[in-house]
Each structure stands twice: as structure tokens, then as C-alpha cells.
Image (cartoon, helix red, strand yellow):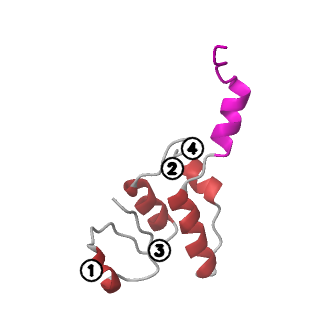
């Protein structure tokens, strides 16, 4: 039996449920910092709907919220020296 291609309706549903893990972690940090931020509004503002959030977009989003942000490459042994809170990515 041939596979049925997804309909536009199911594609929209998949796009709506796409989760930006970096953006969701940023929302956790803003709540911890007692700030108000809307992840969907940030995604719309920076045009990042339906695609993975890269490091550059995440740094821009954090700075837009008036928080300090930078991207660094850190070895696991140096991890305890970085400032917290932090969003990490394993490569």
C-alpha cells in the first residue's frame, strides 16, 4: 500500500506543534528571573517559525529581552566556570 502524503492540514498542525527547545529554555529562564516573555511572540518577531532555532537567533532573542547573552564553546571540564543560568547544546 503506497504511503499517503501529508495533507496541508496535517502539515499546519506539525508546524504549530514544532517546539524550539532553546526558546522554551529561554522562557524558563525568564520566568525564573520574574520577567514576562512570550515565546510565540519572539518566534514571530524574529521569523523563526517552523525551523530549528540556531545559536545566532537564540542570542538575538535573549538580547531583545534585555538580558546578557553570548555564545561560547566550552569543554565539559570547564563547564563549572560558566555563568549561570545558561542554555547548553551538546555537539
Q: Nearer the viewer, mark 3 or mark 1?
A: 1
Quadrant of the frame with the N terminus: top right
Q: Earlier in the sequence, mark 2 or mark 3?
A: 2
Q: What residue sits right under mark 3 in the picture?
A: 67
In the image, farthest residue toward the top: 1
Q: What residue sits right under mark 1 in the picture?
A: 77
Measure the C-alpha gap from mark 2 to mark 1: 34 Å
Residue pictured at 26% horizontal, 73% vertical: 75
Q: What residue sits right under mark 2 in the picture?
A: 46
Measure the C-alpha gap from mark 2 to mark 3: 16 Å
Picture quarter containing residue 70? Answer: bottom left
Measure the C-alpha gap from mark 1 to mark 4: 35 Å
Give the numbered dot on residue 69.
Answer: none
Query: Residue 50: image x %, image y %?
Result: 56, 41
Residue pictured at 67% horizontal, 43% vertical: 16
Q: Which residues are magenta?
A: 1-17
Residue pictured at 71% horizontal, 31% vertical: 10
Amino acid at each position: 500500500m503506497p504511503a499517503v502524503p501529508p495533507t496541508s492540514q496535517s502539515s499546519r498542525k506539525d508546524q504549530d506543534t514544532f517546539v524550539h527547545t532553546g526558546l522554551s529554555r529561554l522562557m524558563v529562564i525568564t520566568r525564573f528571573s520574574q520577567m514576562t516573555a512570550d515565546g510565540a511572540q519572539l518566534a514571530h518577531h524574529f521569523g523563526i517559525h517552523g525551523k530549528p532555532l540556531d545559536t545566532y537567533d537564540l542570542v538575538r532573542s535573549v538580547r531583545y529581552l534585555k538580558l546578557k547573552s553570548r555564545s561560547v564553546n566550552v569543554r565539559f571540564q570547564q563547564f563549572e566556570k560558566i555563568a549561570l543560568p545558561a542554555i547548553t547544546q551538546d555537539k
